[in-house]
Image (cartoon, rainbow, N blue to C red):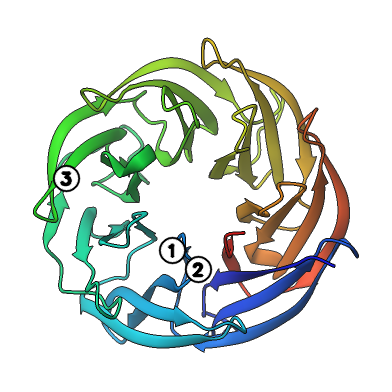
Amino acid sequence: MTKFTGYIGTYTKKTSKGIYSFVLDTDEKKITDVSLVAEIENPTYLTVTNDNQQLFAVGKEGSTGGVSAYSISNDGSLSLINSEYSEGPSPCHVSVDTDKTIVLSANYHKGTAESYPLNTADGSLNSVASIIEHTGTGPNTARQEKPHMHFAGFTLNDQYAVSIDLGTDRVDTYKLVDNKLEEVSSLSVKPGSGPRHIAFHPNGKFAYVMTELSNEVIALSFNSETGAFEELQYISTLPIDFTENSQGSAIHLSSDGNFVYAGNRGHNSISIFQVNSETGQLTFIERTSTEGNWPRDFVLDPTEQFLLASNEQSDTLTLFERDSVTGKLTLLQSEIEAPEPVCVKFLNN
């Protein structure tokens, strides 16, 4: 019997109390044991260290926001190590490097990306070492009136850091020098597209950006020597005749690099694309309903035989079985109750 533990980051606007854990039983092919493991306000995004020893969550407390560090016990429970909060709205994204030396966060409302060095002795967060603050606007006056940083993470092997700015349609690359972010390259993507998240191909040559406003995947080439990106392709994640409100959400790749999965909030689906490993370009395969409302994120389990989606506005998770040959998803379990789920992460196998 194989069981995997995972965690759910949530909004706490209604009934949620913070971070929840769950179990995937791969023999029974179902999700069980959704339970509260940490009380924290609006832990909308989480990340787990490669060695499964720590979890980092964005969060807020009163009029302050920032990042909290937790230790993960053998039974999956969480213990707060410390928090680094400052005045203003909380971040929307958090990531940690492989060696557990630095945490990055992106703040949508402030339009900033921050770096937090980690204390190697106990895994605690040190105060912010650097803050990247963009200027500018985009053509979408409702959503691009100022910078809105939506992602801050790492390229393969932690060679560079990358930020995605929905407000100014930018993808920026940085080197970390003494724990500080120093820009080495910047790419302006299609005006008004509103880039949100990025995922890297395992060959290191390509990356894929999900746009929130134009509902597209942007295929990019990546030069690891310079940190520069170049556009290869734009491909829609929505049906050509779909005219209702939909906003792009998360994007993830299978570890073999053969498939890209992209979430659509509003259309309430996951679009599946096949990757040409020579050109980096994508071919649309199909869309699968998430059987819930507003799929904010999703995750592949450690075996990649399953995909779990989080439907924020219907307070549900949906479990699919994944065909590793075709990339297609088959519904296993819908309407798994989870309050205000935003982000789902598994412990690493």
> Depth-wise, is mark 3 or mark 1 nearer the camera?
1
Task: Give the distance between the C-alpha atoms of the residues marked 3 and 2, in whole angstroms.
Answer: 33 Å
Picture mark count: 3
Residue type at mark 2 is Asn
Cβ–Cβ under 8 Å for marks 1 and 2: yes
Residue type at mark 3 is His
Q: Residue 49's mark?
A: 1
Q: Earlier along the polypeptide chain: callout 3 or callout 1? A: 1
The image shows residue 102, relative to residue 21, as above or below, that is above
Image coordinates of residue 314 in percent, x first then y, are 71, 66
Label 2 Cα neighbours within 10 Å, binned few <14 / some 14-19 / many ≥20: some
The residue under the point 60% across, 15% down is 276
Residue type at mark 1 is Thr
Q: Residue 52's mark?
A: 2
Q: Residue 234's mark?
A: none
- The residue indicated by pointer 3 is 134
Q: Earlier along the polypeptide chain: callout 3 or callout 2? A: 2
> Is residue 98 left or right of 267 when viewed as pictured?
left
Image coordinates of residue 69 in percent, x first then y, are 36, 77
> Is residue 288 left or right of 166 when viewed as pictured?
right
Asked which secondary structure carries label 1, the reply is: loop
The residue under the point 32% across, 41% down is 141
Task: Give the distance between the C-alpha atoms of the residues marked 3 and 1, in whole angstroms.
Answer: 28 Å
